[in-house]
Amino acid sequence: MNAPITRLAIGTALLLAAACGRPEGGAAGGTSEMPAVDRAVAVARAIQAHPTAADSILAAHDLTRAELDALMYDIAADSALARAYTAAVR
């Protein structure tokens, strides 16, 4: 499996685990980061559509692979963001 797709799959699995594992109100932080979710969803959809262009897609969204990983972990750490991401990529 291609490395960007593997990372995307791992990130999605982490999001699902975080969304299912936290009780309501257990979200980390108190600020809304929905633009982060929108960004992650846009990147995920683009990479799913064109997996061989993953690095170009990341560059177009001003992200490195490490920054995408960090973004996905931040989303996974917040149950509300994880739910929003999961719903958006369905």
Image (tube, rainbow, N blue to C red):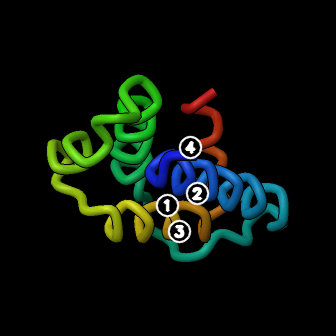
Give the camera-side residue of 72 and 85: 72
Left or right: 12, with 21 as reference point = left
Counting from the top left corner in percent of width and height, residue 61 is at: 20, 46
Going by the numbered disc 2, the residue's amino acid type is Gly
| Residue located at (37% from left, 60% from top) | 68
CA distance separating discs 1 and 3 = 4 Å
Going by the numbered disc 3, the residue's amino acid type is Tyr
Mark closest to the chain's N terminus, 1 or 2: 2
Counting from the top left corner in percent of width and height, residue 2 is at: 49, 46
CA distance separating discs 1 and 2 = 6 Å
The residue labelled by disc 4 is 85
Q: Quadrant of residue 78?
A: bottom right
Mark closest to the chain's N terminus, 4 or 2: 2
The residue labelled by disc 1 is 72
Mark closest to the chain's N terminus, 1 or 4: 1
CA distance separating discs 4 and 2 = 11 Å
* Label 1–label 3 contact, CB within 8 A: yes
Q: Helix or strand or loop: what does disc 1 sit on? A: helix
Going by the numbered disc 1, the residue's amino acid type is Met
The residue labelled by disc 3 is 73
The residue labelled by disc 2 is 11
- Neighbor class of circle 3 (other Cα within 10 Å; few <14, some 14-19, many 20+) is some
